[in-house]
C-alpha cells in the first residue's frame, strides 16, 4: 500500500515538474520571440539612422542650401513627403537615398519618385517583374529591361548582373543615370520621360504620330511632381 502511495506521489511530483518545465519553456520561448522581433526592428531603425548620418557627415563643413545641416533639413522634408505619399510603401532610407542621389544629378527627386510610382503601379515593389513584351520583361523598382540595363550601368560606372535589378537602391541609381542621359540628350522632360517609357525608338514613333512628345506618361509624372513641391511649400 505504501509502495503504491509513494508511486502516486512520485507521479504527481514528476507531473508537476513536467508542467513547470513546459510553462517555463513557453514563457522563455515567447520572450525570445518578442526580443527577436524587437531586435529586428532596432536593426532596421539603425540601418536608416546610419544612412541618414552618413549623408550628414559626408557634407560636414559645407553649410549652404544643398549640403550640411541646412541641406539636411531640405533632404529630410522631401524624404518625409515621399514616404507619406507612398503610404509608407517607400521606406525612409529609400527616400533619403533618392533625394540625395537625384540632387547630385540636378534632377527633381519628386519626378523620379513619380516615375517609380508609375512603373510599379503604386506598389513600389522592388521584386516586381513586368508583363511580357516583344522585348522581354521589365524588372525591379525602375522596371529596367535586360537589353537596356547593362549599358546604362556601364554609363554610370556601376557593376551589373541581373539580380541587382531587384536591389531598390541599385534600381533607383540606374533610373537616375538613365534620366540624366535622356534629359541631356533631348533637353526637355517630355521627350526624356517618353523615351524612358517607350524607348528612344518609341519616342520617335510617338512624335511622328502625334507631332509632339507630350505623352500622358510624361505629362502626368511632371504634374504630380509639382504637387509635392506645393505640399512642402504650404507647410
Image (spheres, grey):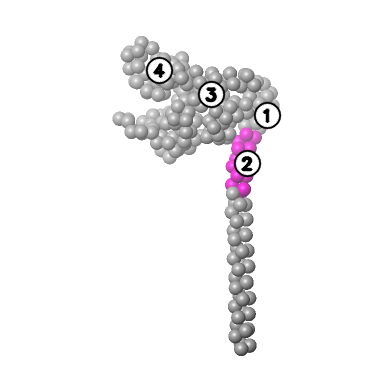
Q: Main secondary structure of the magenta part?
A: helix
Please name the residue that numbered disc 4 is placed on. 215
Q: Residue furthest top?
A: 211
Please name the residue that numbered disc 2 is placed on. 46
Question: Is residue 161 at all visible to an observer of this figure?
Answer: no
Q: Nearer the viewer, mark 2 or mark 4?
A: 4
Q: Mark 1: few, some, or many residues within 10 Å (few <14, many ≥20)? A: few
Q: Mark 1 or 4 closer to N-term?
A: 1
Residue 210, x across and y down, in percent: 35, 13
Q: Mark 2 or 4 closer to N-term?
A: 2
Q: Position of 165 compared to 50: left or right?
A: left
Q: Residue furthest front?
A: 1
Q: Position of 15 compared to 170: left or right?
A: right
Assign a secondary structure to mark 4: loop
Residue 227 lies within the magenta run: no
Q: Mark 4: few, some, or many residues within 10 Å (few <14, many ≥20)? A: some
Badge number at residue 60 = 1
Question: Is residue 29 at all visible to an observer of this figure?
Answer: yes
Q: Mark 3 or 1 closer to N-term?
A: 1
Give the residue displayed 62% in from the left and 41% down from the top: 46
Q: Mark 1 or 2 closer to N-term?
A: 2
Residues at discs 2 and 4 in contact (Cβ within 8 Å): no
The range drawn in magenta is 38-54
Please name the residue that numbered disc 3 is placed on. 110
Identify the image quadrant of the C terminus.
top right
Identify the image quadrant of the N terminus.
bottom right
Amino acid at each position: 500500500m505504501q509502495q503504491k502511495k509513494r508511486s502516486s506521489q512520485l507521479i504527481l511530483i514528476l507531473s508537476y515538474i513536467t508542467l513547470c518545465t513546459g510553462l517555463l519553456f513557453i514563457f522563455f520561448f515567447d520572450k525570445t520571440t518578442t526580443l527577436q522581433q524587437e531586435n529586428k526592428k532596432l536593426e532596421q531603425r539603425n540601418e536608416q539612422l546610419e544612412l541618414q548620418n552618413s549623408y550628414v557627415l559626408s557634407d560636414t563643413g559645407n553649410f549652404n542650401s544643398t549640403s550640411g545641416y541646412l541641406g539636411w533639413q531640405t533632404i529630410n522634408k522631401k524624404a518625409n513627403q515621399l514616404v507619406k505619399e507612398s503610404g509608407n510603401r517607400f521606406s525612409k532610407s529609400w527616400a533619403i537615398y533618392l533625394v540625395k542621389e537625384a540632387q547630385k544629378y540636378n534632377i527633381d527627386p519628386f519626378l523620379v519618385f513619380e516615375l517609380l510610382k508609375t512603373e510599379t503601379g503604386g506598389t513600389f515593389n522592388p521584386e516586381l517583374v513586368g508583363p511580357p513584351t516583344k522585348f522581354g520583361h521589365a524588372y525591379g523598382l525602375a522596371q529596367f529591361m535586360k537589353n537596356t540595363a547593362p549599358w546604362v550601368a556601364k554609363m554610370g560606372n556601376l557593376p551589373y548582373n541581373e539580380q541587382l535589378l531587384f536591389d531598390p537602391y541599385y534600381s533607383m541609381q540606374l533610373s537616375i543615370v538613365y534620366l540624366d542621359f535622356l534629359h541631356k540628350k533631348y533637353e526637355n522632360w517630355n521627350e526624356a520621360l517618353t523615351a524612358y517609357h517607350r524607348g528612344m525608338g518609341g519616342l520617335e514613333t510617338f512624335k511622328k504620330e502625334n507631332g509632339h512628345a507630350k505623352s500622358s506618361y510624361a505629362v502626368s509624372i511632371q504634374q504630380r511632381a509639382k504637387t509635392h513641391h506645393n505640399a512642402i511649400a504650404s507647410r
